[in-house]
Every structure is written in C-alpha cells, then in structure tokens.
Amino acid sequence: MKTRIDAIPMLALMCVTAIWGSTFFIIKGILTSIPTLDFLGVRFFIAGLVIIVLRGRKLLRASVTTWKRGLMAGVVFAVAQIVQTIGLETADASVSGFITGMYVILTPLLLFIAFRTPISKPVAFALVLAFTGLSILSLNGFSVGRGEGLTFISAVLFAVHIVLLDQWAGQESGLDLAAIQLIALGVICGVSALPGGVVLPSGINGWAVMIYMALIAGIVTVGLQTWAQSRIPATSAAVIMTTEPVFAAIFAILFGGEHLTWRLFAGGSLVVGAMLLAELAPRKSLTADGGVAVWEDSDSVS
C-alpha cells in the first residue's frame, strides 16, 4: 500500500512525464518558424545560463571526474536531442513520442550488450512487441520514413545516456551531473547553430514557448526527476515514465491537430505494452555501491 510520502514523488514524476509529452507537438510547431539547430541552441543556451547562475559556485568545486562524466553524458544527450528534433521535422509528434519511448526497452538490451546483464524472457518478448509496434508506426508502404528512422536513432542515444548515468549515479552528485549536462547541451547546440547566424523567436508567443522549453521542460523537469527518483524505487519511476508517449499522443491530438488513426492506436498500444512488460518484469535491486540492476527471473537470455 502506497503511503502519502510515496504518492508525492510519484505525482511529481508523473508531472515531469506529462511535461515531456507536451514538448513533442510544441517543438513540431516552433520548427515551422525557427531552424532546428537554432531552436536547440537558444533553448539550451538559456537553460545552461540559468544553471550557471544558480549552481556556478558549487560546480567550481566539483571534481574533474564529475566534469568529465557530466560532459560525456551531455554530449550523448545533445546529439540525441539534435537527431530527435530533426526527425520531428517530418515525423508526426504522436509517432515520435512512441518511438522515443522505446529507450525503456533499449536500455536493458544495451546493458546486456555492454555488461552481459541477463535479459529475462518477459523482456525478450517485450523487445519483439516493441519492434512490431515500431514497424506499424514507422512504415510508409515498404519503406521507413526518414523522420521515424532518425527518431529511433535518438531513442538508442537516450538509452545510452541512461546506461551512462546508471553507471555513475552512485558515484557522483546527481545535481552536479545534471547541471554539467545542461551546460554541455547549451555549448554544443549553441555552437551548432552559429553558422549562418542564429534565428531568434519572434513575438511574445515565440519567446514564451522558448522559455517554457528551456526552464519548465529543461531545468524544472531535471530537478523534479532527480528529487523524485531519490525517494521512490527505480522500477516504479520507470513504469511512470512509460506514459511519456501516451501524453505525447494526447497532446498532439488535442492541441496539435493530429488524428487518432488505427496505425497510431495499434502501434502505440504495442509499444506501451512492451515498455510496461519490460519494466514490470522481476529484477533485483541496485547494489549498494551503485552497480547496475540485474534481471531476477531465472529464465533469462544470457
């Protein structure tokens, strides 16, 4: 039975996931007036600047190892953001949300490849379900759309990012790692936008969207996620995070002018089912020294 203390961080993480889901149709809309790299550059430059103001002194005291790991994770996350946003230029926001959410499935697969962490049969079955759902969402006739393909690559990079943080979470300050990543995002995306000049948002609405993406969908979500995940089990957090593509589809249909099609419903249902199956499968807890979790089911692929 969940206590009130458990419910508060779970509700906070649900808010984080809903905010993430809202960004897909917002980004797709703003990309009609601002080039992709310019949008990312301005967004993360603002976020990075605010982080420096808020945590600048503490970051100066962070260790060299923390900076190296934060920058490495930030580079991976920056490339993932760039690839995902370019994919959104041609992929529907709802479809992009479901494909991006596959990082939940890809993470245990990468752990198996990199660290030989066994994969249970439920997770192996979830991979098959996810691949089927992805095919339904992505295929245009007998070819995969460019936007969907790029979005899948971003999901792989997001999974790599999660694996990196999983290895370092117990050894470094979570807030310092998050702050350094945001700074890396600001630098990489900002420099990428410089050639040819940077196009800034126009009007109050354009800047309001940019501030929302930088502060609410950037700094606030990172802070809430860090706080919430320090108070609830990682498994519970991951199950909540599987609702991100559902929120993405809901926002895209209600506010983004997209329609609920049989392909979106069928493919999205399979992907969400696969993510829930993967996260609800039995597993052991993280070791005391911050080691990676291993699948507890004895019937595993190893």
Image: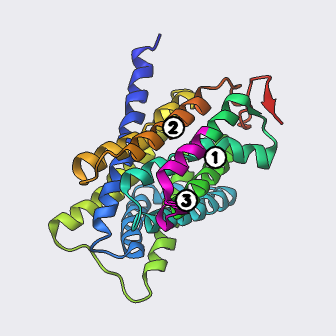
Within the magenta stretch, is there residue 147?
yes
Is 142 located above or below residue 199 in the figure? above
Residue under label 3? 154
The span picked out in magenta is 129-148
| Residue visible at 35% across and 53% down in the picture | 23
Near-viewer residue (271 or 172): 271
Do callouts 2 and 3 mark residues in contact (Cβ within 8 Å)? no
Q: Position of residue 5 (x, y in %)?
A: 42, 19
User: What is the secondary structure assignment of the residue under circle 2?
Assistant: helix
Left or right: 14, with 76 as reference point = left
| Residue visible at 31% across and 80% down in the picture | 199
Amino acid type at image mark 3? Ser
User: What is the secondary structure assignment of the residue under circle 1?
Assistant: helix
Residue 12 location, quadrant: top left
Residue under label 2? 270
Q: Residue furthest left?
A: 204
Of pointers 1 and 3, the one earlier in the residue sequence:
1
The residue carrying pointer 3 sits among few (fewer than 14), some (14 to 19) or many (20 or more) residues within 10 Å by Cα, namely many
User: What is the secondary structure assignment of the residue under circle 3?
Assistant: helix
| Residue visible at 54% across and 61% down in the picture | 142
Within the magenta stretch, is there residue 150?
no
Q: Which mark is residue 106?
A: 1
Amino acid type at image mark 2? Leu
Q: Is residue 85 visible?
A: yes
